[in-house]
Amino acid sequence: MTNPIVSAAWLQEHLNDTDLIILEARLEQNQSNLENQNPNLQIKGARLFDIKNNFSNTSNPLPNTFPSEEQFTAESQKLGISSDSTIVVYDTLGIYSSPRAWWMFKAMGHSKVFVLDGGLPEWIKEGFPTEKQNQINYPKGNFTAKFQPELIKNKEQILENISTKEAVLMDARSADRFHATHEEPRAGLRSGHIPGSISVPFTELQQNGKFKSNEELKEILKLDSQPLYFTCGSGITACIVLLACELISDNPKAVYDGSWTEWGISDLPIEK
């Protein structure tokens, strides 16, 4: 199993590799009220991976849903990404949106993609080179997306899983949202959780913006050999829990792309 995480020290050592592409998986706002402490800085040479706009299906009323192969291919090529690129994704909050970008590349058929543990805060703490945020035009890459449909689940598949219990469904939202003791941050959504799902708040898997040790993750997650599905509010933090599971297991894994934003507005069954 290839380690999907790289350290700031590793990235610093490989900063000048010709096949390296560094992507900042930026989200201007998040539902967890986390704040970017370095809003104008980026890792030296980083390129903007705009989840909300360029890498989402913006015609879908649900937020952050997967784009088409064609859109993902075109936007990746604009960033200079090729089939042989080694991609390191980071975000400005530690580990928040970068696992989503990592999983998108996995689901679009690119395996040489990694997440920077600790993100920009860890990079700055180590004293490694930064620069002012900038957007430039890159030589066009030749990357072609090849969607892996088994890595993404829709509401029908999640509904079926309630009966079959084939997979364990992990919910990355906070425990108070899972148990409906706190209202959803998005207006119009019911409170509660998908029947049969288990609460795994993404915050419990991290310490100081980095993943806890593999031993600690094993103790928290207590995985068996079942397939794993992941949900959250809109498909972003689900990927944090997925990545934590990827660090310690080879179980088949998939994200429910619509997540609670889709489930909570529907007449699908809920538990509290």
Image (spheres, helix red, strand yellow):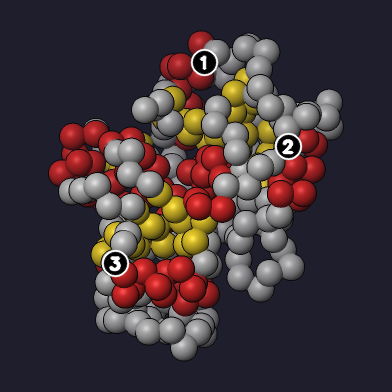
- N-term mark: 3 or 2: 2
Disc 2 crowd, CA 10 A, few/some/many (<14, 14-19, 20+): some
Which residue shows up at 24% across the image and 47% down it? 225
- N-term mark: 2 or 1: 1
Disc 3 crowd, CA 10 A, few/some/many (<14, 14-19, 20+): some
Which residue shows up at 44% across the image and 40% down it? 94
Question: Could you say whether the residue bearing mark 1 is in a helix, strand or loop?
Answer: helix
Decide which of 137, 158 is in the foreground and name it: 158
Which residue shows up at 33% across the image and 38% down it? 250
Q: Quadrant of the C terminus?
A: bottom left
**C-alpha gap between disc 3 and disc 1:** 44 Å
Outermost residue on the bottom side: it is 267
- Residue 131 showing in the rendered view: no
Which residue type does callout 3 highlight?
Answer: Lys
Q: Which residue is mark 3?
A: 165
Q: Nearer the viewer, mark 3 or mark 1?
A: 3
Q: Position of residue 189 (x, y in %)?
A: 47, 82
Residue 144's mark?
Answer: 2
Q: Position of residue 268 (x, y in %)?
A: 43, 84
- N-term mark: 3 or 1: 1
Q: Quadrant of residue 16?
A: top right
Disc 1 crowd, CA 10 A, few/some/many (<14, 14-19, 20+): some
**C-alpha gap between disc 3 and disc 2:** 35 Å
Q: Nearer the viewer, mark 3 or mark 2?
A: 3
Check contact, mark 2 vs mark 1: CB within 8 A: no
Residue 12's mark?
Answer: 1
Question: Could you say whether the residue bearing mark 2 is in a helix, strand or loop?
Answer: loop
Q: Position of residue 117 (x, y in %)?
A: 41, 32
Question: Could you say whether the residue bearing mark 3 is in a helix, strand or loop?
Answer: loop
Outermost residue on the left side: it is 219
